[in-house]
Amino acid sequence: MKFILGTKLNMTQIFDKDGIVHPATAILATPNTITQVKNTDSDGYTAIQIGSGTRNVSRIHKAQKGAWKDLGTFTALKEFRIGDTTAFKAGDKVELGQFKEGDVVEVSGISKGKGFQGVVKRHGFHGGPRTHGQKHSEREPGSIGGGLRNKVPKKMRMAGRMGGDRITVKNLKVVHIDPSTNTLYIEGAVPGRRGTLLEISGK
C-alpha cells in the first residue's frame, strides 16, 4: 500500500503526451517520517502512524517529545491502516517516489467551511414559487410535515452549518510528479482550501 501526507497548493492544468489537457490539483508532499508502527499485540490493530512538517520545539507537548524522541517536530500526525506492518519501523522515511504517473489514489481531507447556510445552498432545495402572492418565500424551506408532530424528526434537512466535514474522493489519477519540488499533481478536485492537510493513499 502507498501512502503519504501532503498540503494542497492550488489547481492547474497538465497537458499529456497527446496534447490533452487535464485539470489537476497540485499537492506538496515533502518526505514524511514514520513515528509509530502499531500491531495487534499492543494496539489491537495494525497501522502506520506518520508525521509531516516541522514546528517550533516550544509548541510541542512533553508527551509528544517523549513519543517522537529524535524523530522530528511534526505539525501533523495521521494513521494509515494496513494489513502487514513488518516492513516498516519508526524513523523510516515515506517519500513521493513510491507513486508514479497513472496510479489511482484516494484523497481525504477537511472540506471548506461555509458557515451557517440555508436549505437552497446546503441541500439544493428549489424554494417557493415567485408568483401567486408569494412575498418573501423564494428561498424558504417550506413545511416539515403536518399531523400531530411535536418535534423535528432526526435527519430532517434544514438550515445549519455547512462544510468542515471529512471528505474522501476515490478513483483519482496521478497525472504528473515533480520530484525536484516534491509536488504531486492529481487529476480533478480534492477537498479543502489552499493549505489543507491531505491524506493520499493507493494500492
Image (cartoon, grey):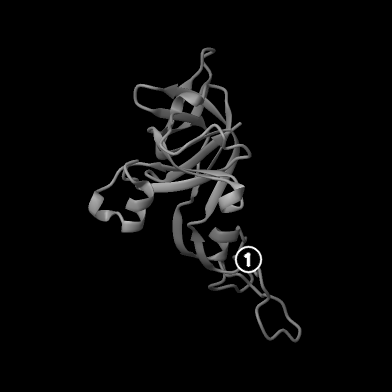
Q: Nearer the viewer, residue 142 or 188?
A: 188
- Quadrant of residue 169 in the image? top right
3 versus 166 height, above or below: above
Residue to which mark 1 is pinned: 129
- Quadrant of residue 137 in the image? bottom right
Q: Is residue 192 visible?
A: no
At mark 1, the secondary structure is loop
21 versus 115 height, above or below: above
Q: Amino acid at mark 1?
A: Pro
Instruction: Give the x, y percent position of residue 109.
Output: 49, 47
Instruction: Give the x, y percent position of residue 136.
Output: 53, 73
Tell me which residue sits at (60%, 64%) in the image: 127
Tell me which residue sits at (62%, 60%) in the image: 126
- The answer to whether 33 appears left or right of 17 in the picture is left
- On-image quarter of the N terminus: top right
124 versus 73 height, above or below: below
Residue pushed farthest front?
41
Instruction: Give the x, y percent position of residue 65.
Output: 32, 51
* Label 1 crowd bin: few (<14), some (14–19), many (20+), radius 10 Å: few
Instruction: Give the x, y percent position of residue 5.
Output: 45, 39
- On-image quarter of the C terminus: top right
> In this figure, what is the number of numbered marks?
1
